[in-house]
Image: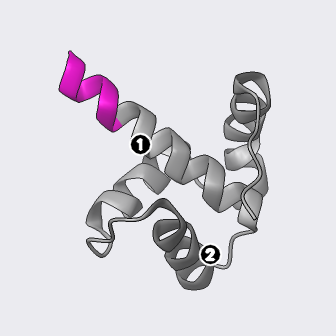
């Protein structure tokens, strides 16, 4: 089951990532970029959770942010 978050909830989660993980969001985005070439969103979330001991919410927020920024680069 997938849980959808509002944009505000996503922003709040992203803002808390450095406090809860000890790493900046930009570091996490590089980690995803350097990680395995997974296609599906849930595969990326599962990999990030397992490889870096993150909660589901943290991993989902990071992958969602990664996808948002990647899409913005393609459009820009």
Residue found at x 31% / y 37% = 70
Give how far across and how far down residue 42 sits, in percent.
54, 67
Q: In which quadrant is the N terminus drawn?
A: bottom right
Instruction: Count residues near mark 2 (Cα–Cα under 10 Å), then give few for <14, some for 14-19, many for 20+.
Output: some
Image quadrant in which you'd find residue 31 = bottom left
Residue found at x 32% / y 31% = 71
Give how far across and how far down residue 11 sits, in percent.
70, 28
Residue placed under numbered mark 2 in the picture: 49
Q: Is residue 66 left or right of residue 21?
A: left
**Span colored in magenta:** 70-76
Which mark, residue 67?
A: 1
In the image, residue 76 sits, relative to residue 43, either above or below, namely above
55 or 25: nearer the viewer: 55
In the image, residue 75 sits, relative to residue 30, either above or below, namely above
Image quadrant in which you'd find residue 7 = top right
Give how far across and how far down residue 15 sits, in percent.
71, 34
Instruction: Count residues near mark 1 (Cα–Cα under 10 Å), then give few for <14, some for 14-19, many for 20+.
Output: some
């Amino acid at each position: 089951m997938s849980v959808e978050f509002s944009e505000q909830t996503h922003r709040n989660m992203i803002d808390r990532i450095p406090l809860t993980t000890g790493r900046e969001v930009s570091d996490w985005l590089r980690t995803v970029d350097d990680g395995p070439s997974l296609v599906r969103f849930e595969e990326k979330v599962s990999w990030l959770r397992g490889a870096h001991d993150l909660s589901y919410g943290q991993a989902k927020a990071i992958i969602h942010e990664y996808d948002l920024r990647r899409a913005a680069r393609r459009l820009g």
